[in-house]
Amino acid sequence: MEYRRRYSRYQTGTAAPKYNEPIRQPKKKVRVREYRKIEVSYREHPLTAQRRKTMVKICATAAVVFLMLTLVVAINGLSSKVSLQNVKIQENINDLQEQIEKINVDITTSCDIHSIAQDAEERLDMSFPRDDQVRYVVLDEDLPTEQSENIGQNN
């Protein structure tokens, strides 16, 4: 019987034994912790303050350099835009000057006495007067000297 009692807690027919009773574990000793009161210090170490000031100066310098470079790029862009506008305006001025020169040439050629005579003969069927068709007009009033000399040369 004792045999049965001793091995009765094992399950028969399995490879691994299983206990019917739970395994007892030793009790742990509970240790009471003692807490010390910690003083909180709000003072800053001098090296930390110095490092913080140095980092603030570095960040401020980097921000100023960044803003200056941004300003340089913006001014460069504006000057490029103005230069492009100046080039376009100069091209427009050159085109207009060429047109003015063409118009002036057309005006001078159309006001030339030879072209007027040619147009009169071709378009209006006019011709120069013959000697028997020429009439001279003499005015009784005295003309200024310049005009009287010109009239004398024409006669």
Image (cartoon, rainbow, N blue to C red):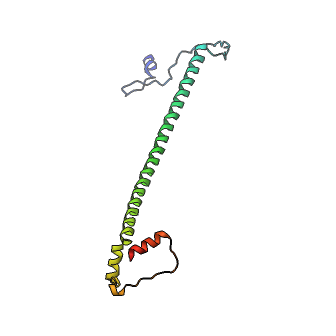
Task: Locate the C terminus and report the quarter of the image it occupies.
Answer: bottom left
Query: How many numbered tags mark residues here?
Result: 0
Q: Single out the residue that lies furthest toward the bottom.
A: 132
Q: Looking at the picture, how far across and down is residue 83, in whole percent?
A: 44, 47
Between 88 and 104, the one nearer to me in the picture: 104
Q: Quadrant of the N terminus?
A: top left
Residue 99, x across and y down, in percent: 39, 63
Q: Is residue 91 above or below residue 42?
A: below
Looking at the picture, does residue 107 appear above or below residue 67? below
- Residue pictured at 51% horizontal, 80% vertical: 140
State the image quarter where residue 95 is shown: bottom left
Frontmost residue, 6 versus 124:
124
Give how far across and how far down residue 148 sits, in percent: 46, 73
Rendering quarter of residue 105 = bottom left
Residue 125 appears in view: no
Q: Is residue 84 visible?
A: yes
Query: Does residue 91 lie above or below 27 as drawn?
Result: below
- The residue sitting at 33% across, 73% down in the picture is 114
Residue 41 position within the rendered picture, expressed as x and y whole percent measured from the top left: 66, 15
Residue appearing at x 43%, y 71% in the figure: 149
Residue drawn at 34 percent across, 79 percent down? 119
Relative depth, front residue between 23 and 61: 61
